[in-house]
């Protein structure tokens, strides 16, 4: 999708603000001799911004609006390196709420719904983002935050919550607890708005079937407001994103060149109206594609496909590049196993070893199933893993994001 004239004007307005504020990106632009873009070709000459730039700007080097206009900060949930601090003006908070409200509306959620919010509050953008959109919509927010599953289920029953907002990992944990306790008839959930981590079709189907609800994928990242910048509609043909607030490109992660609509690559986002910390051509490292054509729902907002993974998810094992999504796809073809899996990579006796743990019910032959999965992985990926089948419930469940890939090579001496 080529950038429009109106979007170019919005980009120029943000460039002016960045240069005037002397922010890292303003300095980058001045160094590159670019302080205005007149055409789509000009736009493609703008340098990318990266997570490292944002970390280097710690604590408030990203602040582009005057401090007296900053009403809040948020920080990314990353565990490595310095955190990224994102300042927000009142307009940024309002715009974010407006985008999130649209997400709820696209999911068919109204002001008569009771929205059960389990993601974390505080520096993380999740909980407060879900709540901000909920209040804009005029629905009833039940701001639980994460953890205390006992209390979550008690409130869900008492308050007759109709919408669950959570990570896919926590939605699965709640679904399993509801099944275990036999209280499905006391739960009034109709829809789930799920974000913050990639999840497989198998996991999605399991949560939807177990809770008897419609599920919606919500997209976002702290650097770009937070969750709420895109969501799938009832036709489930990709996530609509709000192109009056954001311009999205898909690039080849190796060359940095744009790829045609429909081709997979790395998502690059430009914020068109953000005041506190505008970002131009920000490399997200998320992998997806822009879906060409119109959606059957008739909405004019462009669509982004499901997030396939991240450029930094790639595992190199025995000289072969592997993405977790490839393993996930293989595992998804085995009906005998649950949606949960764990990959552990270690270096033993001078060579890399991949162990894949999967869960199954006790009524299958674990050894035979393990061999079938091993053979399938080998035929697709090209090397032989060690597959261990365990009983359902053995692998860890999480209230936040579940760690599915554990690379122990870097822990070993």
Image (tube, rainbow, N blue to C red):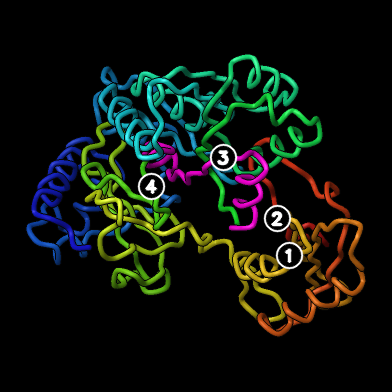
Whether residue 27 is visible: no
Q: Is residue 255 left or right of residue 191?
A: left
Single out the mark in the foreground, 2 or 4: 4
Q: Residue at x 43, y 38 (%)?
A: 227
Q: CA distance from mark 2 to mark 3?
A: 17 Å
- Residue underneath mark 2: 339
Nearest to viewer (mark 4 / mark 3): 3
Q: Residue at x 24, y 39 (%)?
A: 22
- The residue beneath circle 3 is 213
Of the numbered discs 2 and 3, the one sitting upstream in the chain is 3
Q: Which of the two labelled residues, at mark 2 and mark 4, occupies the earlier sequence position?
A: 4
As rendered, which of 320 and 239 lies closer to the eye?
239
Q: Which residues are magenta?
A: 201-228
> Is 10 left, or right, of 375 in this rendering?
left
Under tag 4, what secondary structure?
Answer: loop
What is the C-alpha distance between the residues marked 1 and 4? 27 Å
**Residue bearing the label numbered 4:** 233
Mark drawn on residue 335: 1
Residue drawn at the location 43% of the way across and 29% of the way down: 129
Q: Residue at x 40, y 39 (%)?
A: 107
- Depth check, mark 2 against mark 3: the one in front is 3
């Amino acid at each position: 999708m080529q950038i429009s004239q109106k979007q170019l004007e919005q980009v120029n307005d943000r460039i002016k603000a960045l240069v005037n504020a002397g922010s890292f990106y303003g300095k980058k632009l001045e160094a590159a001799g670019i302080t205005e873009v007149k055409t789509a070709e000009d736009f493609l000459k703008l340098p990318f911004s990266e997570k490292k730039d944002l970390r280097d700007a710690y604590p408030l080097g990203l602040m582009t609006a005057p401090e007296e206009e900053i009403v809040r900060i948020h920080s990314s949930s990353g565990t490595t390196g310095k955190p990224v601090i994102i300042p927000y003006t009142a307009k940024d908070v309002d715009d974010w709420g407006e985008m999130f409200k649209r997400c709820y509306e696209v999911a068919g959620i109204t002001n008569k719904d009771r929205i059960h919010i389990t993601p974390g509050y505080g520096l993380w953008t999740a909980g407060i983002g879900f709540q901000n959109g909920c209040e804009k919509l005029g629905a009833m927010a039940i701001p639980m935050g994460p953890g205390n599953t006992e209390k979550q289920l008690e409130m869900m029953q008492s308050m007759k919550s109709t919408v669950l907002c959570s990570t896919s990992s926590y939605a699965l944990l709640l679904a399993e607890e509801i099944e275990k306790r036999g209280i499905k008839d006391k739960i009034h959930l109709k829809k789930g708005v799920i974000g913050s981590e990639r999840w497989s079709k198998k996991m999605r189907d399991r949560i939807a079937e177990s809770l008897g609800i419609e599920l919606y994928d919500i997209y976002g990242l702290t650097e770009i407001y937070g969750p709420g910048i895109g969501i799938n509609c009832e036709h489930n043909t990709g996530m609509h994103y709000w192109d009056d607030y954001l311009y999205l490109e898909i690039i080849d992660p190796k060359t940095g060149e744009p790829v045609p609509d429909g081709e997979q690559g790395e998502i690059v986002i430009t914020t068109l109206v953000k005041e506190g910390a505008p970002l131009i051509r920000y490399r997200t490292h998320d992998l997806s594609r822009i879906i060409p054509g119109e959606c059957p729902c008739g909405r004019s907002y462009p669509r982004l496909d499901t997030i396939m993974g991240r450029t930094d998810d790639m595992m190199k094992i025995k000289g072969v590049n592997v993405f977790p999504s490839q393993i996930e796809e293989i595992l998804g073809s085995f009906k005998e196993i649950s949606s949960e899996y764990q990959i552990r990579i270690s270096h033993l006796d001078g060579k890399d070893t991949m162990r894949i743990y999967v869960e199954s019910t006790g009524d299958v032959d674990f050894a035979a199933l393990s061999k079938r999965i091993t053979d399938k992985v080998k035929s697709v990926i090209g090397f032989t893993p060690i597959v261990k089948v365990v009983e359902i419930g053995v692998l860890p469940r999480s209230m936040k994001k579940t760690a599915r890939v554990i690379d122990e090579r870097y822990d070993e001496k």
